[in-house]
Image (spheres, rainbow, N blue to C red):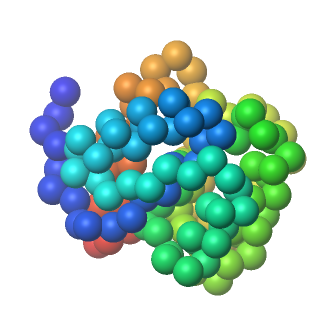
Amino acid sequence: MSPTPTLPTELVVVVDDDPAVGAHIADELEGRGVECVHVQDFDVAYEIAVHHRPALMVIDQILESEEGSRLLRKLDALEDAPWVVLLRYAPGPTGPFRNLHVTLISGESWFEDLPDVVARQVYARAY
């Protein structure tokens, strides 16, 4: 495993309707030095995106596919849209996107891959 990079202090929003999974993801990222907030509601996630301009949003889209798709469309309409990592992505009518930069993570190792993907995305956006 590669050493944890030094990251800028930028907010990452974890959007997952399962409180245990979302908290576990946020804890794992915070352990890597990433400032996180976990929300379960897609409308709250959008308000955070509008008012706090997070560096990245980690969104579990599969459980609430219609709400997740609506959130992605609303985020894409923002001029300064956050970068998005979609977890356990199920193919569906979510793209193409005009403003969003989207990374998809799926498969059996998605949880192990997530911290490195988030670190790279936060670092890339900051620099």
Residue 127 drawn at (x, y percent): 29, 72
Relative to residue 4, is residue 89 depicted above or below? above
Q: Nearer the viewer, residue 116 or 53?
A: 53
Q: Is residue 43 above or below residue 58?
A: below
Viewer-closest of 35 and 85: 35
Residue occupying image coordinates x 65% and y 40%: 17
| Residue 126 picture location, percent across and down | 32, 71
Provide residue 111's location: percent of width, then percent of height: 44, 27
Q: Where does the image place residue 2, in percent across and percent down from the top left?
A: 17, 34
Q: Is residue 98 above or below residue 17?
A: below
Specify the quadrant that holds the N terminus: top left
Q: Is residue 77 left or right of residue 24?
A: right
In the displayed image of the protein, which residue is found farthest to the top? 108
Please indicate whether residue 71 sits to the left or right of residue 5 in the image. right
Q: Residue at x 58, y 28 (%)?
A: 106
Kindly indicate the quadrant of the structure image that contains residue 49. bottom right
In screen coordinates, is 41 left or right of 93? left
**Could you tell me which residue is drawn at 73 percent across and 34 percent down?**
62
Query: Is any part of residue 60 visible from this angle?
Result: no
Residue 100 versus residue 13 in the image, above or below: below
**Residue at the extreme front of the image, as rendered:** 19
